[in-house]
Amino acid sequence: MSEPAEQVAVVCPSCSPQTETVHEVLKEGGGGHATVRCTECGHVHKVSVERETTVERDVVVSQGDESVSTTVDAPAEEVIAVGEEFIVDTPEAIMLARITSLDLGEDRRVDEATVEDVRTIWTRAVDNVSVNVTVHPKDGRRDETRSLTVQVPGDYEFTVGEVEAFGDEKFEVEGIHVRDDSSGYRFDKFDHEGDVVFAKDAKRVYARDETSTAWSAW
């Protein structure tokens, strides 16, 4: 069984000189040219076909205290930036990853670059994340403050003023510190009742025991 012909979208001088229509590629030529046939009217003509160049780049995905390495193929001229998310296939699992740094080589790291210029894309997994929580005791004594880590989906919402329960832990959210690679937030700290931050964007959650008296970490 023969494979289906490659198709491209180009204008047809016969039936659609202003709007692109689907054409079948009949023959590849030199210099990026090809002989194509319009699927609308059957007209055969030559066109210049632009081919998108892709390159393979190393990707490091961190998840908690561990990290895995893999590679991705991406358009060479595409501009990528810290904070953007994409699906990456690692040896362990398919993950949603967020770019945290772009390594250009020779210890040069930037927040934005074309894929062609990047050597390694540093990321962290954001589909499932670990969130650090600082819990203050009911009497507000800082020397008895304790830390814990909760595992939640990346799109889990932490809301200031709401009570959260994880196993034997139960606390009221007082404030949330947002990660540097997050976008869409006006501030890097939130402590007003009703403020919401996604778990994947939370650097640390500040909270107090649900039965404690009011005490602020800010």
Image (tube, helix red, strand yellow):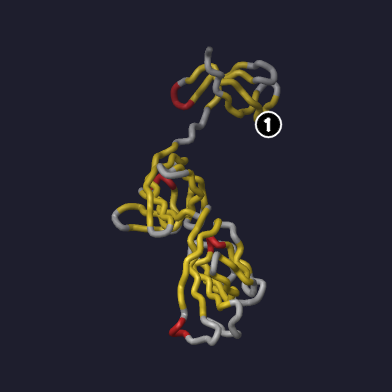
Location of residue 198 by image quarter: bottom right
- The answer to whether residue 36 is seen in the rendering is yes
Q: Residue at x 62, y 71 (%)?
A: 163
Q: Amino acid at mark 1?
A: Thr
- Estimate how packed mark 1 is, as few (under 14), some (14 to 19) or many (20 or more) residues with alpha carbons within 10 Å: few
Q: Residue furthest front?
A: 168
Direction from residue 56 to residue 78 in the image, left or right? right
Q: Residue at x 40, y 48 (%)?
A: 59
**Residue 215 x %, y %:** 57, 85
SS of the residue at dot 1?
A: strand
Residue closest to the eye, 120 or 47 = 120
Q: Disc 1 designates what residue? A: 19
Residue toward you, 184 or 127:
127
Q: Is residue 75 above or below residue 126?
A: above
Give above or below for 105 relative to 193. above
> Could you tell me residue 53's position as x and y percent?
45, 36
Position of residue 172 in the picture relative to residue 90 (left or right): right
Residue drawn at x 49%, y 74% as measured from the top left: 134
Q: Is residue 190 visible?
A: no
